[in-house]
Amino acid sequence: MIKQAGSIEGKTPQRILIINYDGEHRTIEANKGAEMVIISTIETLRACFPQTEFVTTIQLSERLSQGLDCKVIKNKIYSTTTYSLSSSVKSFVDLVRCLSWRAVRKYARLNLKALVNNKKLREYSSADVIIHLGMDLYSDDFGLRTIIEHSKDLLLGVMLGKPVVMWAESIGPFKSRVTRWLAKFTLNRVSLITVREEISNQHLEEVAVNKPPIYITADPAFLTDPAPEGCVQTILEEEDLSDSKRPLIGMCLTYLPSRVVRKSRKFTFMESLYRTLQYTLPEGLFKVIVKVASQTRFYSPAAIKQNSYIKSMAQVADYLVERLNATIVLMPHIQGTGLLVTERAIHEEVWQQTNHKDNIRLVAYEYTAQEIKGIIGQCELFIGGKMHSNIAALSQCIPTVGLAYSYKFEGIMEMLGQENYVCSNITFEEVISKVIDAWNRKEEIRTELGARLKDVRALSTLNARLVKDFVDSR
């Protein structure tokens, strides 16, 4: 049951620290969904704590950090990975230092600040509240290594005696004994958990996470505003979309994990080797190896052509041009570069395999999350393989068909009564069936979304109010 936040005035925290281990060594704006989340997170928290300083370990650009008035703890930026073996060792040492500090303080009644006197731990020590902005990363879906690293980050705050909040996340599933134990051990020690759909709450119950208060809220990205209309119209002109007499249908695709689509043995092997070398080798050496390997017959990003997903999405785009007389707008929601396969490369490959290229446009330039949301807002229907691109559409009452690679799609779409428009198999037939149904019901769907969005946005705002309620109660 969702409890309503109270209005008791308590002590205002002087400093709120926002963490996400995956964001410590890369600029977050490459992922437009993550950008939407951090914008709305800081804005809603600041509405509750207007005098509080915000600090983050997530690497924000100067544009975003200044716009949000949020201090960034600067770290080395990796261009090819989120973290490395050396950063994992460093985080382990940090955890040992915090455990030692806690033990000495508890048993010897001494506060040995020297144990927690490096750049990262000083920020943890000076925070009044720590917000874990994990989105969907605390899950077996991203592997044991990711759960371990995020658990270490959470436990740093716990060991230092700080309130730690899991903020509007999709948590789980936990399939192995190790991850189930680690999730139970770690999450039962945080102060507050909010999840953005019911399925995550079920995952927590399955591993007996029951000590902190748990609330079902909604993704904060529902609160992110699109760019102003004038800005969006300028972008449409730059992208040669402003004079289109055809209805616009947006498509955002993603690189699907092996558990969702079948890949060739060659590509699966190369992917596994790539990830292992990416994590263990120094970045400079890794880049050299990939550059050399890319010139051989054993490696080729063109292997994505073997992916039936690419072929199916090209067929979908062509079909909608022919059947609905539409203009298709392909828009990557992750716009960073990569050495193996990038989100843009997937969209480019789809475009290459289409027959109606004059009516299928690939967004040419990189935009902010709010600008991308503004473009999406011009569409009459949206097909999304990234959940936050779908949220950008749904929050503007645009009929949306989700291409699911995770349970979060169904969970979040269900909150808006749109669970019937989630594609689990992602075949041409399934996608087209749901798209045509949504197209035929588009006015009805707009009405349904408009009726539900007020409550969903209230749940998004509730995340910050629950943190305030928690702080006030202390």
Image (tube, rainbow, N blue to C red):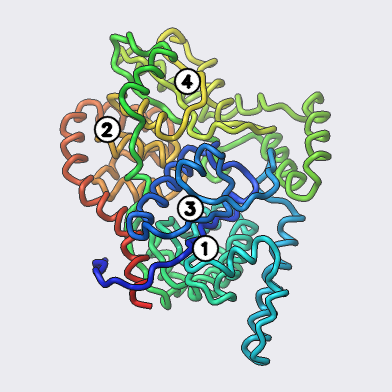
Does residue 106 sit above or below 329 in this rendering? below
Give, as a three-letter code, the residue at label 2. Pro
Numbered circle sitting on residue 399: 2
Give, as a three-letter code, the residue at label 1. Phe
Report the mark closest to the observer, 3 or 1: 3
Residue at 66% over, 78% down: 99
Point out residue 161 in the picture as x, y percentages from the top left corner.
Answer: 54, 77
User: Can the viewer see residue 429?
Assistant: yes
Comes first in the chain, label 4 or label 2: 4
Give, as a three-letter code, the residue at label 4. Val
> Where the C terminus falls, by quadrant?
bottom left
Comes first in the chain, label 2 or label 3: 3
The residue indicated by pointer 3 is 136
The residue indicated by pointer 4 is 363
How much space separates mark 4 and mark 3, taking CA atoms?
26 Å
**Which of the pair 156/81 is nearer the observer?**
156
The residue indicated by pointer 1 is 174
Quarter holding residue 459 = bottom left
Q: Secondary structure at mark 3?
A: loop
How much space separates mark 2 and mark 3, taking CA atoms?
24 Å
Q: Secondary structure at mark 1?
A: loop
Please give left or right for residue 328 compared with residue 253 in the image: left
Comes first in the chain, label 4 or label 3: 3
Does residue 421 sit above or below 353 in this rendering? below
* Labels 2 & 1 near each other (Cβ < 8 A): no
